[in-house]
Amino acid sequence: MKHIYPFLLLLFVGCKPPQPSIATSAPADLSAQTQTFSKRIEKAGDNIYVAIGYGLANSILIEGKDSTIIVDCMESTEAGVQVKRAFDSVCPKPVKAIIYTHFHTDHTSGATALAGTSKPDVYAQDLLPHHLDQTNAVVRPITEKRAYRMFGVFLDSNALVNCGIGPELHIHEKTTLGILRPTVTFRDSLEVTVAGVHLKMYHAPGETADQLFVWLPESKTLLCGDNLYKAFPNLYTIRGTAYRDVNLWKNSLDKMRALKPAVVIPSHTEVIRGEKEGYEILTAYRDAIQYVHDQTVKGMNKGLTPNELAEQIHLPLHLKNHPWLQEYYGKVSWSVRTVFDGYMGFFDGNPATLLPLTNKERAAKMELMAGGKQKLFEQIETAINNKEYQWVMELTDYYLVLYKDDKTIIQYRITALTALGNAQTNPNARHYYLTSALELSGLENTGLIKPTPELVKNVPIVTIFNAMAAHLNAEKSADVQKRVLFDFTDTKQQWTVEVRNGIAEVQPYKTAEPDITIQVKEQVWKELAARIRKPLPTFLSGEIKIDGGQVAFLNFMKLFDIEGE
């Protein structure tokens, strides 16, 4: 009966498998970056405390007259519990409000722990719920897998030095998420007084479209979210993201800079004190972003391809050497590519790449050009011996397309990945290489987040159905026409899922007479989908009723893919 609940499984799956080990070393400057986020509660003002080094991000406490405000909430309930305990030691007042600077997991998923027994208002920019749900519903499986590589979640303490903007992402097999949905949202700006603290929130798109910053005018303190941290900005993230509009990011920094803050508190890395210091760092940061944008556009308009631009564009020395612009998180070369893609899309302008050979066709021709399978093998061996590790990666790409189970070539690729990872100062690149090597050594990169009834309760039902549509198996359903009505008896909502020749149309109402009708409470269905409940006892208890045949329904659900099944 496993096929009855595929959709939320795509959001919350798996447990941490045994980890293969890997021999690693690290550049000295990456090791030195760890000092930036040594674990501490730092007092950043008369009534402001910053939890640094408890996880990937910072959490910020603003003390009011009789209660507190929390800005950003860590990546998990477990990390949130640690921060809550530390905050209570300096200020045990109840939590009146929570502010999310943006939707990313490391800023939202410890909210229930930090709220404790309080029932705070939760503030966010209008776009946050959409982005939170869109990520969960559509691309969670692939972004989660790539994020685990990028943050080195499966690496041991020797391989994982730090994550560039924080010590590590605290996600593991016992992780739970405690997200509170926003109760107050705004479009452009919002001015409020909470617990006697006067503050303003401004929409400031940058690393995400829903990004905001918090301004405390009385103390001239700026809480800038993830639009500034002590590393070159992640204008593109290798875990995968929608285009981050770098012009809007620069403009948001200008908006912050114009305030001339006396204290700047990023949601990663360290606090900046002094109006002059803050203004200079904000200026350098926005200048670096503008430089990458302008030089990319200039070269793009001359007909240069993304590869050519990435080779040619480098920051001027005064920015390249700036301590807040070292490539511990983003990279200039990745940023150049994303600016090109943001304007021009996937096609680089070279007609040779417009309708390229398939991977298998190209690999076969490379093998032929090398002089046959043995000669291609020998080329890889030569590259290994010469420590030309990037060339090893490219040659093994071709070889493994044709001979995917060749253990010697796989081992050469592991050697190349390990060497490339060890050489990287950028943690994202380092972790991606090293984790990829582990995967070839037997690591199963699977989801680690276990669902709870409380967590799935907050997942909008539309998220489940959007995920369902996105994971229809087009081949299995090519000749199928079947309509299923989900009738939720508690919320009185009805959802229709119609599979029609490789397409799953989802509508939040009854579209026509269904072939199958499912009657169930919404929360029961969510728990079934998340594998919190077992299907057979739920059927036997009468909590789910099927009109149209249980076997027909199970066959319908088999049309939807679950990764790994």
Image (cartoon, grey):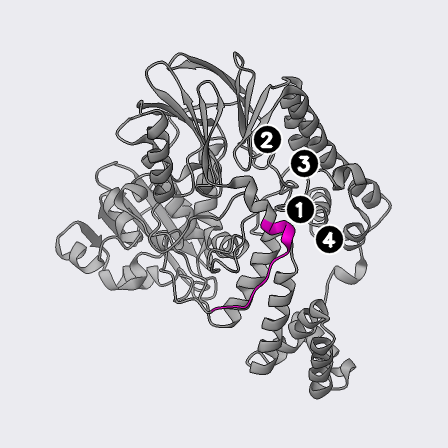
Q: Provide residue 513's location: percent of width, then percent of height.
A: 31, 48
x 35%, y 46%: residue:
496
Q: Residue 255: which quarter of the image?
A: top right
Give the amino acid type for the residue marked by disc 1 in the picture: Glu
The numbered mark at residue 205 is 2
Q: Which residue is mark 4?
A: 347
| Disc number lying in front (4 or 1) | 1
How many residues crowd mark 2 within 10 Å: few (<14), some (14–19), many (20+)?
Answer: many
Circle 3 sits in a helix, a strand or a loop, which is it?
A: helix
Circle 2 sits in a helix, a strand or a loop, which is it?
A: loop
Main SS, magenta residues: loop
Give the amino acid type for the residue marked by disc 4 in the picture: Phe
Q: Is residue 87 left or right of residue 348?
A: left
The numbered mark at residue 327 is 1
Q: Is residue 22 magenta?
A: yes
Q: Residue 235: which quarter of the image?
A: top right
Q: CA distance from mark 1 to mark 3?
A: 17 Å
